[in-house]
Image: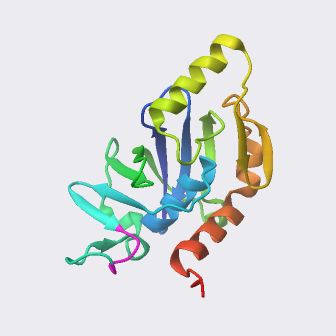
Amino acid sequence: MARVYTFKIIYMGCENKIWRDIQISSNSTMAVLGYAVLSSFSTCAYHLFYMEYKGTNYELNDEEFQTKPKLMAETKLGNLKLEIGDKIHMIYDFGEEQEFEITLLSDEEMSRGSGRTYPKVSDGAGRGIIDDMSAEDLLDLIKKIDKTGKSDFIYAHKEEHLPWDYHNYQIDIDNCLLKGEIAKIKSAYENPVEDF
């Protein structure tokens, strides 16, 4: 029987400002959890990422590595034998090393017929992160916004050119877009199109 895991996901360096609680099926892979993080935290999802759990690294593919790593897309969350309080560490963008701490908050039996409900965001704060900006620089921007009450940082993301303000997180919109965004991100990472 499938389980519903609820994870608390914090963006390291901005823990109290930008975070999510995401519910996901135990039948989902680690990769899908990663895609949910990338989507919900408003990344452009164009950098590589990996996860680490109990000293084992999980990668998207093994082409770049001399030793064969465990693959996220082949590892179901239920196979990790997670216990409440266990943490998965995720690093996105190896240049900036944007880090996420993913902690298991709860493990409940999934109601029959509700599998399509997941993944979903059950709680959260902070609009998201900014690609290619370190957590330290993002926290400085957040402090400036808190002090002045406004943002003068214009952020281009998905054809938007608006002042970036971390206050503007809307969970209902996030959930409305989440599954479609996960599918797009999954396709881009797992079936990349070669440039000729």
Quadrant of the drawing holding the C terminus = bottom right
Name the foreground residue: 21 vs 19. Answer: 19
Seen in the image, is 10 located left or right of residue 127? Answer: left
- Residue at left offset 38%, top offset 76%: 61
- Residue at left offset 62%, top offset 33%: 126
Report the span colored magenta: 59-63
Q: Point out the residue furthest to the bottom here.
A: 196
- Residue at left offset 59%, top offset 59%: 111
Q: Is residue 76 above or below residue 38?
A: below
Q: Is residue 30 above or below residue 163?
A: below
Determine if residue 1 is in view: no
Seen in the image, is 84 located left or right of residue 138? Answer: left
In magenta stretch: residue 60: yes
Seen in the image, is 186 located left or right of residue 80? Answer: right
Quarter of image, res 167 = top right
Q: Main secondary structure of the magenta part?
A: loop
Give the percent coordinates (x, y) of residue 162: 79, 39
- Residue at left offset 37%, top offset 71%: 75
In magenta stretch: residue 49: no
Give the percent coordinates (x, y) of residue 123: 61, 38
Q: Is residue 158 above or below residue 189?
A: above
Give the percent coordinates (x, y) of residue 99: 41, 45
Quarter of image, res 69 = bottom left
Name the foreground residue: 126 vs 172. Answer: 126
